[in-house]
Image (cartoon, rainbow, N blue to C red):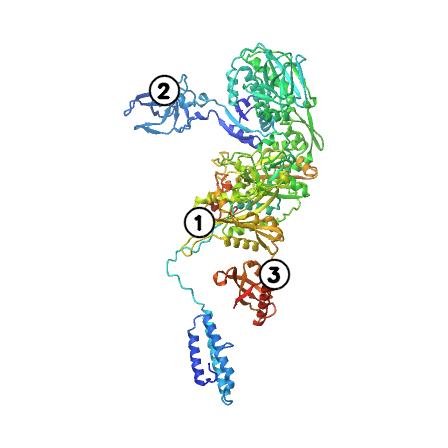
């Protein structure tokens, strides 16, 4: 809401500077977002007299002048205007002045001659279009007099952020009322022309909820001409374009009191009655802006005897619009249901100053007062002669009744942390024109019609706190009980996992929760795959952001793609974030799962002088995942199965107790191509919810054995169908005293024969009770070998 | 060794060789090998001793003594040498070239700046007694608006351009829905913070993003007051931005709190003088706050006459931008490695002792 300080001064004294006022209002809850000084562009522009004027020695078209600006010394100014001459009164921009276009005046030299300012033309001052020469001032002032007030408008505009609960502040009077309360000053109500409600016109309201009140005034002998300059100036400063005297009066009252008015050419209304009803389907109306609008039952319309003549609370119709020929006017001042107007405005996709106020709630009790004000103005500016009789129809009587709110004194103090008594409270509230009745424990507050936002006790407490000053509320006593914080284990573990991966050399990324509906196709997910059927948005920003992600992978591939030109040798990134899995076909809230995805690409170790660089491979990724699972104490046995549905892609499911805890693999090159990535990408995804269930056990201490470890190397040969995991499982199950097991060699090749592989383990044995001798270890190894032979047909190749 | 050939001269030669070899051995492996060769279970001296039975009975004691004598002597040398070598495992070969060459480089990584800032904020509130609570990103209209006292068809909903999934489901526009969700499941007193992602249907520009992050705070107890709110919020700002930063509370409107406030802190760019960071106001808006509206308590099933509470909310991205002078909110989700890497080194330096 743009308010003019000059306009505000009509209703309340303002002594403060605009900056101080802005800051005080901000602290009072009216956030001033901008202060625009309409005169500011002329600061540094002063009245001057040309005392001497001669030709520039080096330039034909320039003159060298001496100008009196009231200082001890005349200013040297080089001027290019043809009309400059001795004795001329001029506007001089002195050193430091900043002109409209941001041009800053500095002392300088022009073609070798000093110039200490500028004699201005109309264009340079931004007040006219004559750039042919300097402006010749037709007035006599002291040399050096400040011209900013004369040249510009000396008004200052405040841009105030009005919150949706305070429609009363959408007017100059409303803001003035706040200023009066803030500074404890008197509010001057604007002058009015007294109207007498009589049954002079028919009014027909279909539904009192849609239109609780409809008032109308009548003006005769209307002459349509432009409104006076003072009115135009104030309207312009509030951002409203002047049109004609009658329309300007309605807009003036709108900006002054916040009550939208509409003027009808009374001779173009059919019959002696007007009314309000819902629109009919297939009805159309041409509005003031010459646009044909389709009406439906969500839209509220104004009707005369023949049909609809305007859209209620939003915009009038073109047919009954005030024109040059208008001589009689019906002035409408009504109140409409906020929800109705909001629906109506949304349905038509049309919002106006009027609808903005009505949907926030107008002052139902103030409709006649607004008419009285408009009539006074019309008479004052001689735009017409108002009739004393008006028509006022109250369809919903309770809407104009004053409301009372009980404020419990103890509750006010409890919520604010203050110690105010009933008189303190009432004297604060009365500053806002809220009448109070004080009793021992309570204050009864009588709420005027323009403050319908005050509905209950807490609303009143807020007003008290605001008037008392938030800054004056200190911590007088500390009343809180003991509320100790609990540690969220899930959050703590997730943070630990993040730190772990960061220290493993992964860069954490945080990507968008949205996915592109083209992602399923690019990823090669089948149509029946749940990942291809994400939650969709009804009103997305773009197709790229039209659904909620079902996987972190597409977003992370985009990160890799985007970072490709960044000369990154190796890519190691991870993200821990939510994916949104549809439930109940997307009709319910989705299952929000936290996934951790890591990706590795290009070089495994940076190229450097001391070691060879190499490409990332499957086992780099697998090692990181295994290390992570180990760190997260996922101790239960894991099964790794190739995902058949994703074949030929190499995607593996890691299962624990039948649940997928992680997925790992290689992004197929066909997918990489779609994301414009040129190097292979290995990835794993850990399902954090499953991780939390399967791992993160507390560490356990076990007594350390004082006896030495015995080491044995064991090399076995297996058929292709047997895996490392099978062999290790058998060894771990059968080997008594086994303390450590590590695979340190693997071979497949001609020497072994086709379909055979050899695995060499380093096994460490230790007993808690004694030093193991060779015999005991030999026995264990034999047992292991027997089991390997029996269960897996794995045979001994060599033992050391 | 030929058993029959056991004689004094052979043994003496063997002794000399062994002594020489032990003296030459330069590492533990070699010493160990020599021990096995001479003194081990199958070593030459052990074998000699076993073969003593083949000698005439009269020669046996002398020869036995000799062998044991040599064995003792070699054991002694072995132990001494072992100790000598162990004590001096040998310095690694000094590098003969440029000592200024860089050490081995590992892959570099680190946490996202938003993770770091979120952690720092959480840490402060955890110390103050706040616990963590979380809520869904895809949320019911009920929790995001209705239960927070935003009436249906009310202009207060306009301030938050909303992404809708359908009539009842939307992407949360604020972390405040967690308030009612948490109060429904927990009895007072309670003190929680809730960080998370929020969504606004806004065209992105340097200071607006469609996805950003907030942290919500809620404290409900028997007699929580506006004074307590000022206390907690001021403590947080002083902990995060420094103890001398001025803080002010300015009346404002939020449907779900009353009285409501916007909290400003003194601009760190100009210390309140007015600069481009604070748009010449000297103040930077840092969070919204207020006393929980009685209607919100009613929706949560609390009796507004028996408890009071405060709530506050702030933008994590905004705080990170302020703290590090980041000029464009869209940097956070763009994940340019050059951007991410700027926040890997260094650590929390919010408040010095």
B182 w.r.t. B103: above or below: above
Circles 3, 2 touching at the beta carbon (< 8 Å)? no
For mark 1, what is the residue?
A569
From the top left corner, tell me how far across and down residue A386 is, in percent: 60, 12
Q: Which mark is residue B258?
A: none
Q: Which mark is residue A701?
A: 3
Looking at the rendered structure, whether the residues under marks 3 and 2 are on a common chain is answered as yes
- The quadrant of the rendering that contains the N terminus of chain A is top right
Q: Chain of mark 3?
A: A
- On screen, residue A52 versus residue A6, left or right, reads left
**Distance from the alpha carbon under mark 3 to that under mark 2:** 95 Å
To which quarter of the image does residue A117 belong? top left
- Viewer-proximal residue among A294 and B188: A294
Q: How packed is label 2: few (under 14 Cα within 10 Å), some, or many (20 or more)?
A: some
Q: Chain of mark 1?
A: A
Q: Chain of mark 2?
A: A
For mark 2, what is the residue?
A133
Of tags 3 and 2, the one toward the viewer is 3
Furthest residue in direction bottom, as rendered? B58
Circles 2, 1 touching at the beta carbon (< 8 Å)? no
Q: Secondary structure at mark 3?
A: loop
Query: Looking at the image, can residue A191 be seen?
Result: no
In the rendered structure, which disc, 3 or 2, sits on the residue that comes first in sequence? Answer: 2
- Viewer-proximal residue among A782 and B142: A782
């Amino acid at each position: 809401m743009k308010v003019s300080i000059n306009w505000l001064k009509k209703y309340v004294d303002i002594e403060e500077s605009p900056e101080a006022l802005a800051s005080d209002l901000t602290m009072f809850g009216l956030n001033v977002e901008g202060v625009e000084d309409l005169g500011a562009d002329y600061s540094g522009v002063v009245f001057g007299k040309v005392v001497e004027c001669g030709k520039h020695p080096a330039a034909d078209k320039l003159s060298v002048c001496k100008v009196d600006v009231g200082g001890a010394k005349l200013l040297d100014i080089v001027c290019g205007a043809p009309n400059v001459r001795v004795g001329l009164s001029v506007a001089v921009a002195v050193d430091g002045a900043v002109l409209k276009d941001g041009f800053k005046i500095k002392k300088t030299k022009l073609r070798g001659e000093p110039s200490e300012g500028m004699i201005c033309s109309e264009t340079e001052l931004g007040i006219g279009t004559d750039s042919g020469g300097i402006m010749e001032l037709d007035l006599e002032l002291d040399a050096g007099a400040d011209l900013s007030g004369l040249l510009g408008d000396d008004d200052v505009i405040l841009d105030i952020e009005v919150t949706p609960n305070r429609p009363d502040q959408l007017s100059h009077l409303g803001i003035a009322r706040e200023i009066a309360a803030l500074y404890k000053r008197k509010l001057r109500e604007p002058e009015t022309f007294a109207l007498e409600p009589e049954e002079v016109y028919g009014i027909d309201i279909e539904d009192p909820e849609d239109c609780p009140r409809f008032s109308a005034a009548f003006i005769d002998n209307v002459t349509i001409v432009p409104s006076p300059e003072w009115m135009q100036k104030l309207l312009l400063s509030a951002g409203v374009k002047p049109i004609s005297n009658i329309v300007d009066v309605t807009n003036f009252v709108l900006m002054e009191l916040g009550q939208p008015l509409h003027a009808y050419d009374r001779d173009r209304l059919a019959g002696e009655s007007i009314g309000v009803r819902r629109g009919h389907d297939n009805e159309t109306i041409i509005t003031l802006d010459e646009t044909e609008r389709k009406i439906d039952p969500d839209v509220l319309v104004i009707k005369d005897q023949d049909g609809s003549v305007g859209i209620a609370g939003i915009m009038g119709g073109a047919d009954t619009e005030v024109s040059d020929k208008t001589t009689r006017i019906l002035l409408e001042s009504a109140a409409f249901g906020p929800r109705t107007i909001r629906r109506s405005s949304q349905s038509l996709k049309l919002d106006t100053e009027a609808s903005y106020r009505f949907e926030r709630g107008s002052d139902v009790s103030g409709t006649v007062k607004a008419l009285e004000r408009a009539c006074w103005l019309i008479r004052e500016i001689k735009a017409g002669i108002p009739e004393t009789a008006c028509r006022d129809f109250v369809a919903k009587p309770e809407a104009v009744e004053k409301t009372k709110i009980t404020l419990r004194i103890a509750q006010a103090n409890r919520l604010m942390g203050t110690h105010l008594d009933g008189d303190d409270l009432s004297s604060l509230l009365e500053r806002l024109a809220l009448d109070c009745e004080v009793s021992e424990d309570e204050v009864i507050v009588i709420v005027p019609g323009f403050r319908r936002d005050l509905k209950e006790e807490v609303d009143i407490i807020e007003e008290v706190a605001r008037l008392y000053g938030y800054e004056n509320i200190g911590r007088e006593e500390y009343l809180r009980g003991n509320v100790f914080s609990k540690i969220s284990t899930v959050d703590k573990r997730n943070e630990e996992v993040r730190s772990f991966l960061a220290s493993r050399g992964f860069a954490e990324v945080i990507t968008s929760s949205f996915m592109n509906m083209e992602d399923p196709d690019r990823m090669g997910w089948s149509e029946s795959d749940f990942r291809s059927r994400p939650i969709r948005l009804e009103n997305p920003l773009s197709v790229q952001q039209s659904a909620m992600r079902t996987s972190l992978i597409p977003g992370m591939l985009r990160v890799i793609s985007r970072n490709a030109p960044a000369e990154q040798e190796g890519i190691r990134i991870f993200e821990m974030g939510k994916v949104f899995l549809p439930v109940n076909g997307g009709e319910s809230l989705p299952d929000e799962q936290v996934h951790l995805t890591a990706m590795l690409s290009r070089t495994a170790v940076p190229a450097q002088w001391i070691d060879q660089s190499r490409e990332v491979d499957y086992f780099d990724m697998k090692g990181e995942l295994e290390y992570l699972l180990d760190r997260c104490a996922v101790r239960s046995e894991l099964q790794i199965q190739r995902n058949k549905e994703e074949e030929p892609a190499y995607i593996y499911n890691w299962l624990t107790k039948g649940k997928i805890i992680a997925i790992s693999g290689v992004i197929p090159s066909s997918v990489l191509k779609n994301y414009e990535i040129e190097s292979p990408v290995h990835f794993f995804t850990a399902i954090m919810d499953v991780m939390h269930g399967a791992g993160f056990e507390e560490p356990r201490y076990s007594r350390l054995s004082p006896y030495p470890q015995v080491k044995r190397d064991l090399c076995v040969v297996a058929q292709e169908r047997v895996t490392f995991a099978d062999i290790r499982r058998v060894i771990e199950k059968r080997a008594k005293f086994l303390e450590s097991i590590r695979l340190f060699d693997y071979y497949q090749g001609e020497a072994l024969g086709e379909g055979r592989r050899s695995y060499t383990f380093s096994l460490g044995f230790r007993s808690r009770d004694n030093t193991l001798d060779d015999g005991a270890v030999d026995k264990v190894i034999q047992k292991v070998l027997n089991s390997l032979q029996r269960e897996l047909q794995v045979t001994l190749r060599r033992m050391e | 060794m030929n058993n029959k050939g056991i004689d004094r001269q052979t043994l003496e030669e063997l002794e000399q060789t062994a002594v020489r070899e032990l003296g030459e051995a330069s590492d533990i492996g070699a010493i160990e090998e020599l021990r096995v060769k001479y003194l081990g279970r199958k070593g030459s001296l052990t074998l000699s001793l076993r073969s003593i039975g083949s000698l005439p009975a009269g020669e046996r004691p002398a020869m036995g003594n000799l062998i044991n004598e040599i064995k003792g002597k070699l054991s002694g040398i072995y132990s001494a040498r072992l100790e000598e070598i162990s004590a001096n495992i040998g310095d690694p070969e000094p590098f003969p070239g440029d000592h200024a060459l860089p050490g081995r480089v590992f892959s570099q990584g680190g946490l996202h700046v938003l993770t770091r800032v979120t952690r720092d904020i959480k840490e402060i509130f955890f110390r103050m007694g706040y616990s963590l609570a979380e809520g869904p990103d895809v949320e019911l209209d009920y929790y995001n608006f209705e239960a927070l006292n935003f009436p249906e068809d009310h202009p207060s909903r306009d301030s938050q351009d909303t992404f809708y999934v359908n009539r009842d489901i939307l992407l949360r526009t604020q972390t405040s829905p967690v308030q009612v969700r948490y109060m429904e499941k927990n009895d007072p007193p309670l003190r929680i913070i809730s960080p998370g992602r929020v969504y606004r249907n806004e065209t992105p520009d340097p200071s607006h993003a469609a996805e950003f992050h907030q942290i919500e705070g809620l404290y409900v107890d028997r007699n929580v007051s506006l004074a307590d709110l000022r206390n907690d919020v001021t403590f947080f700002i002083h902990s995060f931005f420094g103890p001398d930063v001025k803080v002010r509370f300015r009346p404002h409107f939020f449907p779900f709190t009353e009285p409501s406030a916007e909290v400003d802190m003194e601009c760190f760019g100009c210390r309140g003088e007015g600069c481009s960071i604070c748009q010449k106001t000297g103040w930077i808006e840092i969070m919204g706050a207020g006393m929980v509206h009685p209607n919100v308590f009613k929706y949560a099933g609390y009796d507004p006459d028996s408890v009071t509470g405060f709530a506050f909310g702030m933008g994590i991205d905004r705080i990170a931008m302020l703290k590090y002078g980041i000029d464009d909110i869209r940097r956070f989700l763009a994940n340019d490695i050059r951007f991410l890497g700027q926040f890997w080194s260094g650590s929390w330096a919010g408040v010095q002792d």
